[in-house]
Amino acid sequence: MITIIDKLGRTNDVDFNIGETLLTCIVRNNLNHGVGICGGCCDCATCHVRVNGNSLNPINEEEDATLDAYALNRYDDSRLGCQIRLTEKMDGYKFTIVNED
Ligand code: FES
């Protein structure tokens, strides 16, 4: 189970499938209001999240550039939900969708 804080600040504890992206999990749980506009192509930053754990795939150049270009505020723990692959180690992680509105 992971915790997703949605754009309204609501806490959602949801099950996840190992290997899916965080964006897929967000969509499957209907928490995607205004999230994932580019369809997960790493080209919009509407899936901007903050993450409270370290077991993530490393940020790649494209994700880094998209966050720089489109995120209104960027934090040390900023990532894009469409670029995070969920693994067993992330059980218990908390992801906060950044409200870019
Ligand atoms: Fe557009 Fe992730 S859905 S960058």
Image (spheres, rainbow, N blue to C red):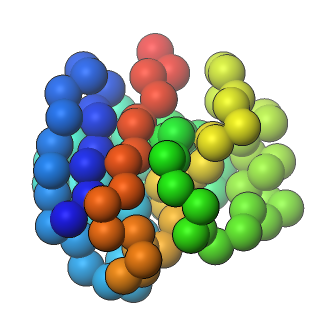
Residue at point 31%, 69% (across, down): 91
Residue in front for this viewpoint, 34 or 31? 31
Q: State whether residue 4 is above or below residue 81.
A: above
In this image, 40 relative to 23: left or right? right
Q: Residue at x 24, y 20 (%)?
A: 8
Say whether residue 73 is left or right of residue 62: left
Q: Does 66 appear above or below 22?
A: above
> Who's the residue at 56% across and 69% down the image?
55
Q: In this view, does 73 lie to the left or right of 14?
A: right
Residue drawn where x is 63% and y is 41% of the image: 78
Q: How many marks?
A: 0
Side of 10 where 92 appears, left or right:
right
Whether residue 41 appears in this view of the structure is no
Percent of width and height locating residue 21: 42, 70
Q: Quick one: 99 or 88, which is closer to the camera?
A: 88
Instruction: Residue lying at the far top in this picture: please name it.
Output: 101
- Looking at the picture, how far across and down is residue 45, in whole percent? 59, 41
Where does residue 97 sit, x and y in percent of width and height? 41, 36
Can residue 10 be seen here? yes
Q: Where is residue 16 in the image (x, y as percent from the top left)?
A: 23, 71
Q: Quadrant of the N terminus?
A: bottom left
